[in-house]
Every structure is written in C-alpha cells, then in structure tokens.
Amino acid sequence: MINIASWKVYLSIAVCVLGVAFAMPNVLSSDLRAKISETMPSFVPSKTVNLGLDLRGGAHLLYDVDVASVFIERAESMLRDVRETLRDEKIGYRRIGVIENGVKVTLRDENDGAAARKLLRAIDANLEINTDGVVIEARLNEAGIKQVYDNTLSQSIEVVRRRIDALGTTEPVIQRQGEDRILIQAPGTDAQDLKSVVGTTAKLAFHLVAEPGSASARRYPYAEDPARSLEVQRAALVTGDMLETAAYAQDQSGQHVISFKLNHAGARRFCDVTRTSVGKPFAIVLDDEVLSAPVIREPICGGSGQISGGFTIQAAGELALLLRAGALPAEMHVVEERTVGPSLGADSIEAGKVAAIIGLARILLFMTISYSLFGLMANVALLINVALIFALLSMLQATLTLPGIAGIVLTIGMAVDANVLIFERIREELRKGRGIISAIDAGYGRAMATIIDSNLTTLIAAVILFSFGSGPIKGFSVTLGIGIVTSFFTAIMITRLLVLTWLKKNRNAKTLPV
C-alpha cells in the first residue's frame, strides 16, 4: 500500500485537474462564461449544474386527465365495429347503442345470440358480456378499464414530454399521480407559457364540408369568429396522427402559416379524396374549431400543404410545435397551479450555501485539530472531492435541487470518514511499536475492507433511492451516489499520495504528524 505506480499518480493528478476545470464554470459569472464560450475552443469546459425548480424557480402544474371522454370515444368506436361486424355476418338487430363502457345490442332472433357473443369477444378480449334474451350488453371488464387508464396516462405523459422538450426546458419532472392525474414541474418556465403548450389538445383533422341536410354532418364553430359555424362530414379524411412533420412558414403574401407533410398513408388517402372532390371545400379542424375551409382546386398528391388561419408568428410556431409533438389522447384540466419565484429559489440557494460552508468549515477545523498535518492533507482531498462532485454534476447535466444540496452536505461529512479510519488505524499501529512506514502500510491495508463496506452499503442505498424515488428523492440520491464515488477516490488515492510525498521528503522523521 506504500508504493503507488507512476501511471496511477499521473492519472490521479489528471483527474484532479480536469475536475477543477469542469467545476470552475459554476463559480464564474454568466457574462464571463458567455465570453469563454465565444472565444475559447469547444473542448474548454463551459457547462454548469442545472438548478431545479426549488432553486431556480419555475412552474408547478397538476393536471386532471379527462379519461371519461376516452371511454366515450372507445364506446363509440366499439359501436361502429359491432355494427359493421353484425352486418357483415348478416346478424339482424333491432336496436344498437352506446352504454357506459360498452355497447348494447337488441337482436331480432335469440338464436343468433351465440354467434353475436362470439363476434363481440373477437372485437375486444376485455369485454364482459351479459345476455338477457335478445338483449346483449358488452362492457369493459376491470382489466380493460385499467388498460384504458394506463394507456391514456402513458400517452399523455409522452406527448407532454415531447412538447416540453421542444421548448428547451431542462430536466422537467413529468410523472403520473394517482389514477388520472399528471404532475409537471418545469424549472425556469412561466406557468402561463407552460399551460399554453401543455394543455392544448391539438387534435387536427381534415373534413369534407357536408352537403345541406346531410344526416352524417357535424357543426363546428370558426376559430376566428365563433358566431359563425360550418357543417362538415363526421368522418375525417386525414387525422393528426398522419402528420410526419409541421413547421412555421410564410406564404407568398407574407402571411404566417404552418407547412406540413403527411406520412405515406396520409398522403395517399388525401390524394385519393381530393382527386374525387375537386371543386368542393374541405375544412381544417383543430380542437373542434374550423381554422379554414379552402376549396380543392386540384388533386393534392404530394403529401405536403399549408394551414392558414390568421396566425401570429408566435401562434403559428406554438401550433407547429404541438402538431409535431402529437395530439393528447384526452383533454387535461389544471387542478393545481403554482409558480415558484426566482427570489424563493435564490433564498434556497443562499441557505444551502450557508449550510455547506458551515459544515465544510467545521469539518476542516476538526480534521486540522485532530490530525495535525495529516488532517490538512485530508482537508485538501476534501476540497478536491467537492470540486469533483460539481464537475460530474456539470458533465452529466444533472439537476441540483435543495435535497441535492443536502446530499452534498452529507457527503462532505462522509468524505473524511475514510481518512479518520485510516489515521486512527495508523495511530493504533504506532502505539503497538511499529515503525513509520510499517504503521502507514498497515493503516491503509487494514482499514481498506471497512472503507469499502461502508461506502458500498451507502451506495446501494443511493441506487435504491434513485430507482424507486422520484423528484427530490432522486436529486438527493444522485448527489449522494456521486459523492460516495468521489470521496472513495480522494481518500484512497489523493490523501495517500500526499502522505507518501511527505514521507519521501522526511525519510529520517521519527514521528508522524497524525
């Protein structure tokens, strides 16, 4: 344990230098960092630790997802499937309609019951079918209901995540709460701006305008003038899920529009419909509002087009973002809204700084008083340890929260634990009459097993917290886990390197300053 290979020495020094370099941007002003980024090569460290919602300020939103509407859409879709299937199989029925979480069919002939039930089970394996004579009721069972909830929430979370990521927000927290709620925390974002992007359903569809008196018509108001409305065919020609991309653009007259491109299936379908509908108007409907209703002048077969609607630059950009991210499967309603101001975040940062400085100062003082020169060596290793923690947090672009600061403060206390074990072991060996070199060798060798056990058990706890925790708990576990790794390195390599450097310069020393 006394001798250290040369490559280990050089590697340790390189790690320390890089650690200080990558941690340095965190103590520089934003203006100075900007100048460094502009003038220095790209490999020069410039990243800083991301601050979480409680430190930087931002938006906290809790949404309630309207899963009930999904069940209604699911039942209506099931109704269409059942009607078409019964007609295809030539099974007569008197009435068919939607009931809660399912459909109800009244057959003409009770003898068709077995065949009808078989067809219903083929439509959805999660249907619970009850029969009373010629009346058959098919409803989703518990497994089917749970599947709808899980699918709706997971799809909503994914769409929300894509929308927020497109805004450039760093490390947002987006997670399910309870059965039908989604929690969103976005650092550095205003709640109103976040709501305008997150809460919009963005269901886009192209419909042919209905003929007067059509039985399959549906009326939508115009977005620009709700007093006006338009009847369109209920079935959509193209839906938003067929969009391949959407982006802000300007047309030849300078009007702000949204250019879009359909996928292969959407382009083919749009081409077929427009080829047979030349001269007829079609409506572009977004969230049950008509944006525009242009006339089809010629077949549109390229799969590309533009959406106009009197947009501003910001509105067109936001709508293009929403269309790219996809439509929400259900409407979401805000049930809790909170904005954490930057001043509160600044107070939290200041309180965290004070706690860290006081903790660090007391540990440095304790180590110096208790272990003299060796204590100062441990203090140098501790300062390098703090630099390495912030270097790794900056490189990983991890988010630092108030619990994360608590993890750093805890790590500062734990970082000297290994040195305390080693120094006490060296003292014990000296009391037994061992020589200086032998005592140092035994101190490091015999304390190693205890150091590994203590750090490994704490690291396991940090991994478990990260795996099963969320939000602030993850922030705490990240800083704790990083701190354990860096403290083990500094205690075993840096402190030992300093001790051996002192030993080489004081070969004739009779006692150790420990």
Image (cartoon, grey):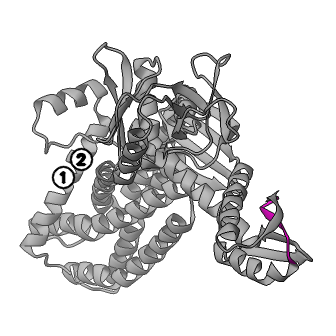
Residue at the extreme top: 253
Image quadrant in which you'd find residue 110:
bottom right
Residue at the extreme left: 6
Q: In the drawing, does residue 510 fall left or right of residue 456? A: left
Picture residue at 18% right of the left edge, 52% below the top: 18
Q: Which contiguous range is marked in magenta?
A: 99-109
Quadrant the C terminus occupies: bottom left
Q: Which residue is mark 1?
A: 18
Image quadrant in which you'd find residue 2:
bottom left
User: Can residue 431 be seen by looking at this rendering?
Assistant: no
Residue 152 percent location from the top left of the image:
62, 56
Where 179 sits versus 146, above or below? Answer: above
Residue 251 percent location from the top left of the image:
31, 20
Q: Amino acid at mark 1?
A: Leu
Residue at the extreme right: 133
Picture residue at 11% right of the left edge, 34% below the top: 40
Q: In the drawing, does residue 107 fall left or right of residue 164? A: right
* 101 inside magenta stretch: yes
Residue 203 percent location from the top left of the image:
55, 40
Q: Amino acid at mark 2?
A: Phe
Residue 368 percent location from the top left of the image:
36, 55
Marker disc for residue 22: 2
Which of these two is toward me, 204 or 181?
204
Where 287 sits versus 432, above or below? Answer: above
Picture residue at 44% right of the left edge, 44% below the top: 325
* 241 inside magenta stretch: no
Q: In the drawing, does residue 100 fall left or right of residue 54? A: right
Where 442 sits versus 383, above or below? Answer: below
Picture residue at 67% right of the left edge, 42% below the top: 216
User: Can residue 385 be seen by looking at this rendering?
Assistant: yes
